[in-house]
Image (tube, rainbow, N blue to C red):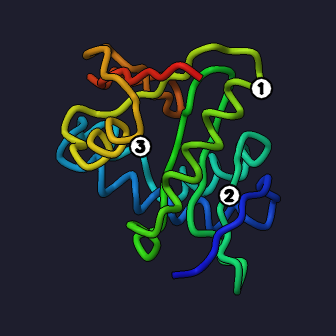
Amino acid sequence: MPAFSLRSAIAEDAEAVARIWYDGWCDGHLGQVSEALVAARTPESFRARAAQRVGDTVVAVTGAGHEVAGFVMVVDDEVEQAYVSADHRGSGVAGLLLAEAERLVAVAGHRRAWLAVVAGNARARRFYERCGWADEGVFDHAAVISGGTITVPAHRYVKPV
């Protein structure tokens, strides 16, 4: 099992982040969200968003090859995105990234972190619950797309930090 380290993302990481994000998003969202949102979430949209969000992103890299194994994006008290490459699932990198997200929320002066998970993403929901996050229930999450937003029923998970 490779060792992982965390660092702030750099522009050169954007392509790897976009690939992990798109693949993970498809795994957790296809069949769970509207066709309109699926149509808006093209590989190109993930590439553009990953490049724009480098400043909000922390990546986990393998110790040997410095391959991006996963990433987390945090803004204020929200863990907006957290994804791990399929090649590194089960390696512990997700827990490492989530702990870093919690730390970033606390350092920013917040006492509680939150994140949104679509109802049907059972794997993610189980992971967050194992990590001490509590499900506060369903809410309407506004997914931003080009030209507006799409409402997505999601569960709001919270954790004191």
Q: Nearer the viewer, mark 2 or mark 1?
A: 1
26 over 37 or under it: above or below: below
Q: Is residue 128 left or right of residue 50?
A: left
Q: Write down the residue under mark 3.
A: 40
Secondary-structure class at tag 2: strand
60 over 39 or under it: above or below: below
Mark 1 residue type: Val
Q: Residues within 10 Å of mark 2 (few under 14, many from 20)?
A: many
- The residue under the point 78% across, 57% down is 7
- The residue under the point 38% across, 20% down is 141
> Contact, CB < 8 Å: mark 2 with mark 1?
no
Secondary-structure class at tag 1: helix
User: How far across and down, in percent of the image, does residue 55 sit?
Assistant: 79, 43
- CA–CA distance in space, label 2 to label 3: 25 Å
Q: Residues within 10 Å of mark 3 (few under 14, many from 20)?
A: some
Q: Write down the residue under mark 1.
A: 107
Secondary-structure class at tag 3: helix
Q: Nearer the viewer, mark 3 or mark 1?
A: 1
Q: Count the marks: how many?
A: 3
- CA–CA distance in space, label 2 to label 1: 18 Å
Marks 2 and 3, the one that precedes in the sequence? 3
- The residue under the point 34% across, 38% down is 37
- CA–CA distance in space, label 3 to label 1: 34 Å
User: How far across and down, in percent of the image, does residue 106 sit?
Assistant: 70, 24
User: How far across and down, in percent of the image, does residue 108 sit?
Assistant: 77, 22
Mark 2 residue type: Val
Marker disc for residue 59: 2
